[in-house]
């Protein structure tokens, strides 16, 4: 994922830079006024809804990546435990389970108080890439929890393992 922002990034509004990113990635999006942008992409398993909002009073850029998975009441405790375990291993952002949707979301806010250069293309690329990676990693675990297969709990431990190297 790579894009080129306008030459004078210091003058660009953070949401304008976000719009350049989602346009270069050819994602569907809608601009909700000057301070908000919503984008969506299909990952093959489900849809991720990306939400960017500039908060002028806080001088901060809010970001959330909502996962297309509604947690049923009987799984709420297990999903919350899963998200707590995942959050303990994240360096950037965290997973949340908003009550109004019961759908997990990766969230992060970039504070930019008195930051003359504003948000950079690299910051946005890193933020979005991290969110998509973590959400794609979480999806199989959520599907395993939702499965009626009695072996799903064992498979869940495998799905959440960090892997590295080459096969």
Image (tube, rainbow, N blue to C red):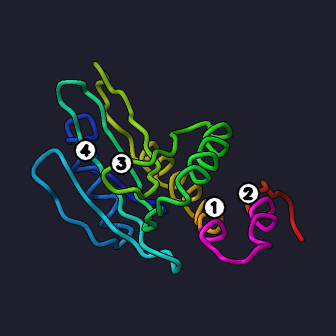
Residue situated furthest front in the rendering:
74
Dot 2: within a 10 Å radius of its alpha carbon, few (fewer than 14), some, or many (20 or more) residues? some
Q: Nearer the viewer, mark 4 or mark 1?
A: 1
Q: Considering depth in this image, is 25 or 82 the residue closer to the camera?
A: 82
Instruction: State the residue position of label 3.
Output: 99
Q: Which SS class for mark 1?
A: helix
Dot 3: within a 10 Å radius of its alpha carbon, few (fewer than 14), some, or many (20 or more) residues? few
Instruction: State the residue position of label 1.
Output: 137
Mark 4–mark 1 CB contact (< 8 Å):
no
Of the residues under marks 4 and 1, which one precedes in the sequence? Answer: 4
- The label number, if any, that marks residue 53 in the structure image: 4
Of the residues under marks 2 and 1, which one precedes in the sequence? Answer: 1
Q: Residue at x 51, y 80 (%)?
A: 44
Of the residues under marks 1 and 3, which one precedes in the sequence? Answer: 3
- For the image shown, how many numbered marks are present on the structure? 4
Q: Is residue 23 left or right of residue 156?
A: left
Between the residue at mark 4 and the residue at mark 1, the CA separation in whole angstroms equals 25 Å
State the extent of the magenta-drawn residues as a range. 143-158
* Image quarter in which the C terminus is found: bottom right
Residue situated furthest bottom in the rendering:
44
Between the residue at mark 3 and the residue at mark 2, the CA separation in whole angstroms equals 24 Å
Instruction: Please say if 161 is above or below 9.
Output: below
Of the residues under marks 2 and 4, which one precedes in the sequence? Answer: 4
Of the residues under marks 3 and 2, which one precedes in the sequence? Answer: 3
Q: Considering depth in this image, is 130 or 121 the residue closer to the camera?
A: 130
Q: Nearer the viewer, mark 2 or mark 4?
A: 2
Q: Which SS class for mark 3?
A: loop
Dot 1: within a 10 Å radius of its alpha carbon, few (fewer than 14), some, or many (20 or more) residues? some
Q: Considering depth in this image, is 102 or 106 the residue closer to the camera?
A: 102
Between the residue at mark 2 and the residue at mark 1, the CA separation in whole angstroms equals 7 Å
**Magenta highlight on residue 63:** no
- The label number, if any, that marks residue 160 in the structure image: 2
């Amino acid at each position: 994922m790579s894009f080129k922002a306008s030459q004078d990034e210091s003058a660009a509004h953070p949401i304008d830079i976000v719009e350049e990113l989602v346009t270069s990635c050819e994602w569907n999006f809608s601009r909700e006024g000057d301070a908000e942008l919503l984008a969506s992409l299909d990952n093959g398993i489900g849809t991720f809804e990306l939400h960017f909002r500039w908060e002028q009073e806080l001088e901060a850029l809010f970001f959330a990546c909502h996962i297309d998975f509604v947690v049923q009441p009987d799984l709420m405790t297990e999903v919350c435990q899963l998200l707590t375990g995942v959050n303990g291993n994240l360096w950037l952002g965290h997973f949340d389970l908003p009550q109004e949707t019961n759908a997990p979301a990766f969230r992060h806010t970039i504070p930019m108080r008195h930051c003359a250069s504003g948000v950079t293309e690299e910051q946005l690329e890193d933020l979005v890439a991290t969110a998509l990676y973590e959400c794609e990693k979480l999806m199989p675990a959520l599907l395993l929890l939702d499965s009626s297969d009695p072996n799903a709990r064992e498979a869940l431990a495998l799905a959440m393992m960090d892997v590295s190297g080459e096969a």
